[in-house]
Each structure stands twice: as structure tokens, then as C-alpha cells.
Amino acid sequence: MSTIASIFENKTRKPVISFEIFPPKRDELLKNIDATLAVLASMHPDFVSVTFGAGGSVTNSATVEIASKIKKLGIESVAHLTCLNYSKAEILTMIRNLEASGIENILALRGDSNPNAEPKNDFVHARDLIAFVRENSSLGISAACYPEGHPEAESLDADIRHLKEKVDAGATHLISQLFFDNDIFYRFMDKAGKAGINVPVDAGIMPVVNKAQIERMISLCGASLPEKFRKILDRYENDREALFDAGMAYAVSQIIDLIASGVEGIHIYTMNNPKIADRLTSAIKNLF
Ligand code: FAD
């Protein structure tokens, strides 16, 4: 059994590198994911995680299908799983489905409330899902963390207290929300360590390749934009290729600083674009 925590324990070359992809919305695009996966696999990430639509439909089939394709390529996969809109019985069905497909790791999330789906009230926070999975399965459990605090949290300190509850409930690895200012991540790590959170943490990096994308992401997740990065966006917003180059250069500089500062893992939000993963991995391959 290969849990993500065991990858961190056994790896001699640090940091651990991982990618995140999402299941395409339309069926025909799902077929094209093979090409993306082949390119990602050629970069030998330590694991690839696959997101899960908060939905309300009782299926995580696209996530499971892609996570199991990744395993077949010889790469560890992590299937995201949200709980707000599901009953315990539905979550149990999804857990058994994951196990039957050979998937060994999940990222246990609360998810966001969805106006088209009634919360089922069996799970209020991710912590409840983590405890339920721990009780009912031997899947490896990862959880989300927020260097700037989750947008609903009353404070970063309160959010870190709740994060500790997720670790105490059974999460053995954390993946961070994206951030553009490494100092924010370092401050968060310091606070998390002082709060007794000692599991490995992946720093989430999203290379920005267009301005609409970044504005959408920021309104969704509340990440702050440092002034130097805002200037880059303003300077190159109307030049696709230049913004791609500048966004990549910014992400590479963040990653170099993270590696030099000794982070344990880097999780790259690829947005299903193998060009992004390719550019980043070739820029950092000699830095370990
Ligand atoms: P929780 O840990 O439950 O936290 C949510 C809020 O509740 C926080 O403000 C927290 O401080 C607070 N809280 C927690 N416990 C308590 C308590 N005991 N008492 C009071 N307050 C409490 N969403 C998707 O739909 N699909 C995905 O695939 C997906 N992937 C993600 C991957 C990563 C790496 C990250 C960072 C986020 C992802 N999300 C995804 C988004 C996520 O679902 C949302 O951020 C959601 O709002 C919170 O999920 P959580 O698991 O962090 O929730």
C-alpha cells in the first residue's frame, strides 16, 4: 500500500513533486485526457491528484476513472472527495468504489455549498469525513490547508486549530491552497508547526497564464496578489504569449525559493495543460 505520507517518508530526493488535474466536463474530452496524462507521466511526478465536482450527483465516476488510469501508468494517484452534499451511505458507496478501482489515497474535503444541491447534514466539516473514512477504510487520507486562512474562517489561528482537528482525525498529509507570496506560506508553516501539526505539507503553486483565470481564482479562494505580481499581470494582460512566459517565470521563481527554503512538497495546479507541467518540471529538474 502506497500512501502519500509513505512517499514523503521514503523519498530521499526532496521535495516531493505532484500535479493536480480535473476531469473534463464533457465526455468526449474525457477521452483526450489520456494524452495529457501521458505527458504528465513522462515527467515522473510522485503523485497526481484528481479533483471532484462538489456536484450533488451520487457519483465520483470521472474522478475514479482518471485516478485509476493514473495508477495504471505506474504513478500514485489521489482522488478528491467532498462530503457536504452526501449522506454517509453515499460516501460509503464512493469509498468502496475507490477501493474496488485500486485507488489508495483520497483528499478529504468538505466542498463548497452548491445552490443546486441540498446539504445532507451527515458531514459538516472535512474533519467528519476524515473520521468516517478512517473508521471504514484503510485509504490514505490527505486534507486541504489554507496559508492565508480559509475564506470562511474567523481568523488564521482559528483555521489552524480546525486544521489540527483534521490531522487528529486521521489526515496524514496536507495540500495547500495556491498562494503567490512565499512569505505567507512560511508564516503559515511556522504557526502550523507551533500548533502541533507535524504531517508533510505540499505547497500549492498555480502558474498564471491568463488574467481572467487569475481573477476568477482569486475571487474563489481569496489568495492575495503581491504588488510585483500585479504589475506583471497589468503589463502583459493583452499579450498571451508574454503573459504565459511571465506567469511561468514567476511560478519558477516561487518554486526555487520554496526548494531553497526546504519545503517538503510542491503541488502544481496544472489546469490540465501539459505545457505548464512540462515548462515547470524542466525548469526545476536540476534543482533537487
Ligand atoms: P473544512 O476543513 O471543513 O473547513 C471549512 C471551514 O470550516 C474553514 O473555515 C474551517 O476553519 C471551518 N471549520 C472546520 N472545522 C470546524 C469546526 N469544528 N468548527 C467551526 N469551524 C470549522 N473543492 C471541490 O469541490 N472539489 C475539489 O476537488 C477540491 N479540491 C481542493 C483541493 C485543495 C488542495 C484545496 C485547498 C481545496 C479544494 N477544494 C475542492 C475546495 C474546498 O472544497 C473548499 O475550500 C471548501 O470551502 C473547504 O473545504 P475543506 O475540506 O478545507 O473544509
Image (cartoon, rainbow, N blue to C red):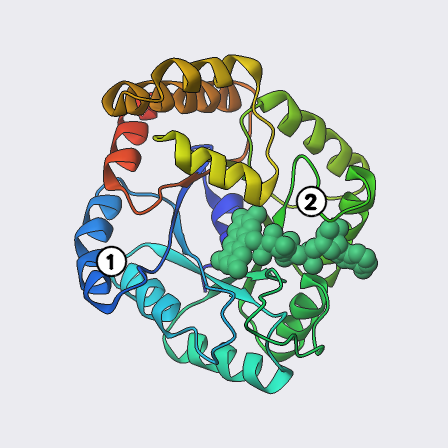
Work out whether residue 233 or residue 279 is closer to the camera in this orientation and state it: 233
* Distance (Cα) linking label 2 and label 1: 36 Å
Residue 85: where, in percent of width, then height? 60, 74
Work out whether residue 168 or residue 153 is closer to the camera in this orientation and state it: 153
The N terminus lies in which quarter of the figure?
Answer: bottom left
- For image coordinates 29% across by 20% down, the residue present is 245
**Hey, what amino acid is under mark 2?**
Pro
Dot 2 beta carbon under 8 Å from ligand 1: yes
Residue 72: where, in percent of width, then height? 26, 63
- For image coordinates 74% across by 38% down, the residue present is 192
The answer to whether 273 is drawn above or below residue 109 in the figure is above
* Residue carrying label 2: 151
Q: Secondary structure at mark 1?
A: loop
* Residue carrying label 1: 73
- For image coordinates 59% across by 77% down, the residue present is 86
The tag earlier along the polypeptide, 2 or 1, is 1
**Structural crowding at the residue carrying mark 1, measured as other residues with C-alpha within 10 Å and reported as few (<14), some (14–19) or many (≥20):** few
- For image coordinates 31% across by 64% down, the residue present is 66
Give the left or right position of residue 58, taking residue 209 as reference. Answer: right
The answer to whether 47 is drawn above or below residue 102 in the figure is above
Which residue extends farthest bottom? 89
Quarter holding residue 263: top right
**Hey, what amino acid is under mark 1?**
Leu
**Structural crowding at the residue carrying mark 2, measured as other residues with C-alpha within 10 Å and reported as few (<14), some (14–19) or many (≥20):** some
Residue 222: where, in percent of width, then height? 61, 38
Residue 149: where, in percent of width, then height? 71, 40
Image quarter for ligand 1: bottom right
